[in-house]
Image (cartoon, grey):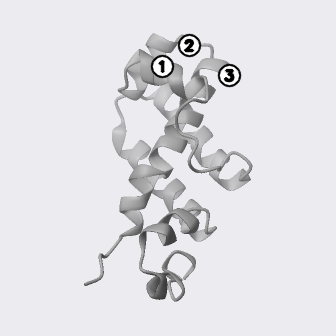
Amino acid sequence: MYKTILPCEVGVKTVLPAVKAIMARSIVEKHGLNEKQTADLLGLSQSAVSRYVGRERGNLLNIEGTTEVIALIDQMVTHLIKQPDNKTELLKLFCQTCTAIREKGLMCTHCQKQMPQEWAEKCFFCRE
């Protein structure tokens, strides 16, 4: 029996923490909010923000060198700061970010570790 692993399941464990880490660092370092303000904005605890900012959390996926992904995350941060109550646009941007990460194959290594080998060798879902 094969366990079906969906890219979204892997994304929750790898993409979401990586994006939150970059967002937290950006809000603190570029926009000058403190960790408590950042936590409130992101719906996180102050200690979680501290771990993201200190690079102790959100490091499973390296997306910081990907220009397209960083541009989308910057849009999310700007939107969150300017219109924190408009969650619909934020969700759309997050889905675009996750799609960009998948299409670039940045998540494949993590996903393939959880798939049976014969599936992993034939899987091109993210890059189709």
> Disc 1 or 2, which lies upstream in sequence?
2
Tell me which corner region of the image, top left, top right, bottom left or bottom right, holds residue 47.
Answer: top left
Q: Are marks 1 and 2 in contact (CB under 8 Å)?
A: yes
- SS at circle 2: loop
| Residue appearing at x 69%, y 45% in the figure | 64
Apparent side of residue 12 relative to residue 76 in the rendered image (left or right): left
Other residues around mark 2 within 10 Å, as few (<14) / some (14–19) / many (≥20): some
| Label disc, if present, on residue 33 of the rendered structure | 2
Percent x, y for residue 96? Answer: 50, 58
In the depicted structure, whether residue 37 falls above or below residue 104:
above
| Label disc, if present, on residue 118 of the rendered structure | none
Apparent side of residue 4 relative to residue 71 in the rendered image (left or right): left
> Disc 1 or 3, which lies upstream in sequence?
3
Other residues around mark 3 within 10 Å, as few (<14) / some (14–19) / many (≥20): few
Tell me which corner region of the image, top left, top right, bottom left or bottom right, holds residue 34.
Answer: top right
| Label disc, if present, on residue 30 of the rendered structure | 3
Q: Are marks 1 and 3 in contact (CB under 8 Å)?
A: no
Identify the image quadrant of the C terminus: bottom right
- The residue pinned by badge 1 equals 38
Other residues around mark 1 within 10 Å, as few (<14) / some (14–19) / many (≥20): many
Percent x, y for residue 43? Answer: 35, 26
The amino acid type, in three-letter code, at marker 2 is Leu
